[in-house]
Image (spheres, rainbow, N blue to C red):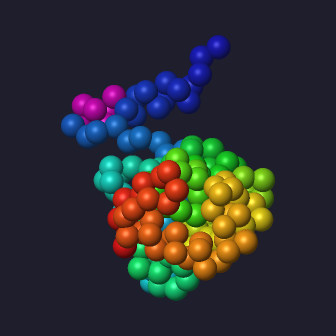
């Protein structure tokens, strides 16, 4: 059976190519939704967005968070976002590029945020994830940790936790782990 739509599409591409125009790449539903989400971003003043691969690659971007309150005040933390074409049905993959002493971010940069896992719903968006990341810095959660050691210290000795965060952000060792300066 002849697929008329496919033939019609090929004819359009050939005509555009003959006219010297680059073929138009069809955007996935995920790219269209992400474009909408990014255009409607309402970032907190402590947060910025950048596109290391250029504006043509919306599916990979970075968010920089500079908390202005709490344990992490004065630090700079960079997160990478990788968004799949099946977004918003699948959550973005988020990693912290900045090594940080935090109960909800492990030393490899994996982030424990419920909306990036079991509580993700397609009605959520990039703005929601960014607000969730900001919340991790103002209200670290010792009840659902990835870094169990940091969670225990936060729960049992908040003053020591604060000293460990300051030491890590200034560039130094906390236990056996070295942290680059991020403040």
Identify the residue at horizontal 21%, vertical 37% (top origin).
20
Quarter of the picture holding the C terminus: bottom left
User: Can you see residue 62?
Assistant: no
Is residue 39 shown above or below 53?
below
Q: Is residue 112 left or right of residue 38?
A: right
Residue placed most toward the observer, 107 or 138: 107
Is residue 130 shown above or below 28?
below
In the rendered structure, does residue 16 fall within the stretch colored magenta? yes
Q: Position of residue 8 (x, y in %)?
A: 48, 30
Q: Is residue 66 left or right of residue 137?
A: left
Is residue 44 shown above or below 141?
below
Q: Position of residue 132 (x, y in %)?
A: 63, 70
Identify the residue at horizontal 67%, vertical 74% (top origin).
157
Identify the residue at horizontal 75%, vertical 60% (top origin).
144
User: Can you see residue 107?
Assistant: yes
Residue placed most toward the observer, 68 or 6: 68
Q: Position of residue 160 (x, y in %)?
A: 59, 74
Q: How many marks?
A: 0
Q: Position of residue 95 (x, y in %)?
A: 52, 52
Magenta segment boundaries in residue numbering: 14-19
Residue 126 figure quarter: bottom right
Extreme-top residue of the structure: 1
Quarter of the picture holding the N terminus: top right
Magenta-colored segment: predominant secondary structure: helix
In the rendered structure, does residue 118 fall within the stretch colored magenta? no
Identify the residue at horizontal 48%, vertical 52% (top origin).
177
């Amino acid at each position: 059976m002849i697929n008329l739509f496919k033939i019609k599409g090929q004819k359009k591409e050939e005509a555009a190519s003959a006219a010297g125009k680059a073929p138009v790449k069809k955007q996935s539903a995920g790219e269209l939704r992400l474009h909408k989400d990014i255009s409607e971003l309402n970032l907190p003043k402590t947060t910025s967005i950048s596109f290391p691969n250029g504006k043509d690659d919306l599916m990979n971007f970075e968010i920089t968070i500079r908390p202005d309150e709490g344990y992490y005040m004065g630090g700079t933390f960079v997160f990478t976002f990788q968004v799949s074409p099946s977004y918003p049905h699948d959550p973005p993959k988020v990693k912290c590029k900045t090594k940080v002493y935090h109960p909800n971010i492990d030393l490899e940069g994996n982030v424990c945020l419920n909306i990036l896992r079991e509580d993700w719903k397609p009605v959520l968006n990039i703005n929601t994830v960014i607000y969730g990341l900001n919340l991790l810095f103002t209200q670290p959660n010792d009840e659902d940790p990835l870094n169990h050691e940091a969670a225990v210290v936060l729960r049992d000795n908040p003053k020591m936790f604060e000293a460990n965060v300051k030491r890590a952000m200034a560039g130094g060792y906390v236990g056996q782990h070295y942290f680059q300066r991020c403040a």
